[in-house]
Image (cartoon, rainbow, N blue to C red):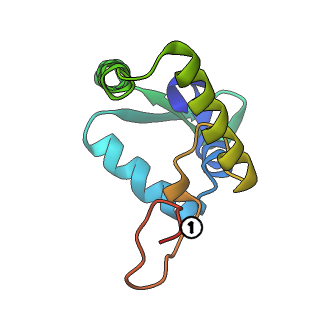
Amino acid sequence: MLSRNEPMNQQALAVHLDLAPSRLVVLVDELASEGIVERRADASDRRAHALHLTPSGRELVARLGQVAREHDQSFGAPLTEPERAQLGDLLQKIADAQGLRPHVHPGYRTLDPPPGARRGGGKS
């Protein structure tokens, strides 16, 4: 999300990811300590900080994108292009029916899953 909307303030990112701001702070702290993101003063609001990817963060996003494309090609190899399109349409129909936001991993929709529940948004 950040790579497509950089810079982005933490509050806007928390809203988009449907995360409690306090949870996002912990995540951003960890990403910052790993040198993936950095906080800078927000030019439009001096009380806020804007999140930026570092060069290492951009490299990581690029590598993850490449891995995802390779996985998609490998996983879908047995399907024809029309079958892939049909599968995509069917999965989108399920996602829409479940109220999942585009581009957000469903595991982040539930902030505190019940004990023993799996993260991932699906029903077990």
Q: 6 left or right of 62?
A: right
Instruction: Pick the quarter of the image with the N terminus.
Output: top right
Give the vertical position of 82 relative to 24 (above or below): above
Please state which of residues 15 and 106 is positioned toward the viewer in this rendering: 106
**Secondary element at image label 1:** loop
| x 41%, y 58%: residue | 26
Amino acid type at image mark 1: Thr
Q: Nearer the viewer, residue 104 or 2?
A: 104
Residue 40 rendering spot, x and y as whole percentages: 50, 32
The residue lying at 54 percent from left, 23 percent from top is 83
Q: Quadrant of residue 119?
A: bottom left
Residue denoted by label 1:
110
Residue 80 vs 87, above or below: the answer is: above
- Toward the bottom, the furthest residue is 115
Q: Residue at x 72, y 30 (%)?
A: 44
Q: Relative to 65, does residue 88 appear above or below in the rendering? A: below
Q: In the displayed image of the protein, which residue is found farthest to the left?
A: 34
Residue 29 lies, in percent from the top left, at 37, 51
Give the x, y percent position of residue 122.
52, 62
In percent of the image, x 56 and y 34: which residue is there?
A: 41
Across and down, in percent, residue 115 comes to: 41, 85
Q: Nearer the viewer, residue 95 or 10?
A: 95
Report the number of numbered marks: 1
Left or right: residue 69 compared with residue 12:
left
- Above or below for 119 versus 33: below
